[in-house]
Image: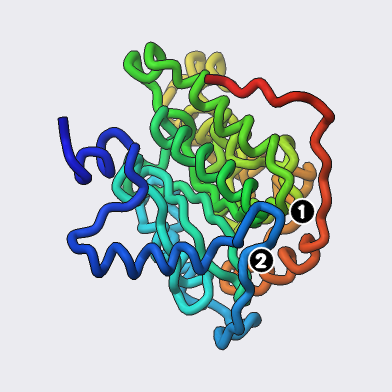
Amino acid sequence: LGGADVHAETSGVCHFAYDDEETCIAEVRYLLSLLPQNNREYPPHVPCADPQTRRSAMLPDLVPADGNRPYDMAKVIEEIVDDGEYLEVHERWARNIVCALARLDGRVVGIVANQPQTLAGVLDIEASEKAARFVQMCDAFNIPIVTFLDVPGFLPGVDQEHGGIIRHGAKLLYAYCNATVPRISLILRKAYGGAYIVMDSQSIGADLTFAWPTNEIAVMGAEGAANVVFRRQIAAAEDPEAMRARMVKEYRAELMHPYYAAERGLVDDVIDPAGTREVLITSLAMLRTKHADLPSRKHGNPPQ
């Protein structure tokens, strides 16, 4: 039926798997150092030698401006967090999303991030469940949540639809909406369709939302949108391909420029990628005293 590898990679039952007992015990100790003693305390704060104002000049180079080019989100996280150290949860399962515990200025945060290196970073059934479970864990133990978005949408296909992608995707939406800890989202590149909404968008209650100049918030990419919006003009043109290229260019210039999201209040600010660390740390400090009460009820009714 399978051992640790099967449950770490296929079933998602196992969060961590190690080759030997010594490494396993060391990682358990590291995990416990990131968690509070109980749900009424805050995670332990440790002194941090990594400067709060450290700029990461490598970040713009790590993330290609071309939305179709992949990159490793893990390297982005390493550049931002304290000393480049983090503990990834479910590392070998649903690799199109990254869930990790790390520290910013010595304080523990939970990071949820799309991984463009796997399936272009789309959300599918497994990724939605993995992220939802992690968000709920962070909320249970008073760990602020930082979300890095670069998502082209939900994974299409018969298998996903028949498997209930809508129902499973709603689990992530529910987890974020139900979380009372500080929540910050950062849009690196693409943020398309319903996947953008459920990845802690401002519309579902993110406390602060930032974006890099490479951000694109839309229902879909410029090419797909132009084919739908300007369908008649393209069909009636003498040179449909030239007209399509022109319409794509106009759509991108008018509706997908770097400050489109800020102009419409979808994000609070468009920031310099190199200053991401400082922005996140100062924002988390501002939200440290956040207090939110859930409605008085027996329990919620999460999608199952």
Q: Residue furthest front?
A: 37
| Camera-nearest residue between 224 and 241 | 224
Q: Position of residue 237 (x, y in %)?
A: 49, 19
Q: Position of residue 228 (x, y in %)?
A: 54, 20
| Camera-nearest residue between 25 and 130 | 25
For residue 175, what is the image quadrant? top right
Q: In the image, is residue 218 above or below residue 271?
A: above
Report helix, strand or loop for mark 2: helix
Q: Judge left or right: residue 88 versus residue 132.
A: left
Q: Judge left or right: residue 45 versus residue 102.
A: right
Q: Position of residue 194 (x, y in %)?
A: 57, 28
Q: Report if residue 258 is visible in the image.
A: no
| Three-letter amino acid code of the residue under disc 2 | Leu
* Residue under the point 41% across and 68% down: 29
Q: Which residue is mark 1?
A: 268
Report helix, strand or loop for mark 1: loop
* Residue under the point 52% across and 50% down: 112
Q: In the image, is residue 4 above or below residue 194?
A: below
| Three-letter amino acid code of the residue under disc 1 | Asp
Q: Which residue is mark 2?
A: 280
